[in-house]
Image (spheres, rainbow, N blue to C red):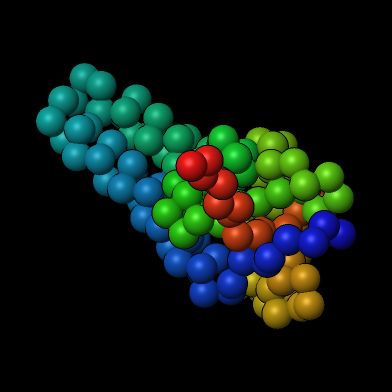
Amino acid sequence: MLERELAGRGDRLVAQFIDSFVAILVIILAAFISGISEKIGEIVVLFGLLFAVFYVLCADGLKGGQSYGKQIMRICVIDATSGKPCTFMKSFIRNIPLAFLGIIDWIFIFSEKRQRLGDMLANTIVVRKKSRSRVS
């Protein structure tokens, strides 16, 4: 496994709350828009729900292995072997257990490597984002 500083459990939890808030906000916005226009209401709500599910499952595959919550908390998901940023497929694999098992998946975060069950399945770890060196 790579020698990187693992992200704190608290940082990970806050990032998860932020990401959940993003997904819920999209659904609320879609519901609000559907109330304004009956013609496109069902389509907008369906799109909002699909986007929210996609975001929750695949957001760790965004640039640098960072969902919006992870960007704010300055942590990222990387492949435990190569150190490369998480891909959309690995994000999907690591987040499916969370979608079905919820808090049970989080129990595994108390292991030495701080990996949820989904992280173990996808061979990922969550680490502190490296700060860029500034050239003077």
Viewer-side residue, 110 vs 84? 84
> What residue do we see at 40% from left, 47% from top?
23
Q: Quadrant of residue 91?
A: top right
> How many numbered discs sit on the rendered protein?
0
**Image coordinates for residue 77, horizontal then vertical, percent:** 65, 51
Residue 54, above or below 15 = above
Quadrant for the N terminus, please.
bottom right
The answer to whether residue 105 is seen in the rendering is no
Q: Is residue 37 left or right of residue 118?
A: left
Residue 57, above or below 75 = above
**Image coordinates for residue 74, horizontal then vertical, percent:** 50, 56
**Image coordinates for residue 127, horizontal then vertical, percent:** 65, 59
Q: Is residue 79 left or right of residue 12?
A: right
> What residue do we see at 27% from left, 46% from top?
28
**Image coordinates for residue 54, horizontal then vertical, percent:** 53, 38
Q: Is residue 5 left or right of residue 47?
A: right
> What residue do we see at 57% from left, 35% from top?
63
> What residue do we see at 58% from left, 73% from top?
9
Viewer-side residue, 98 vs 127? 127
Viewer-side residue, 133 vs 121? 133
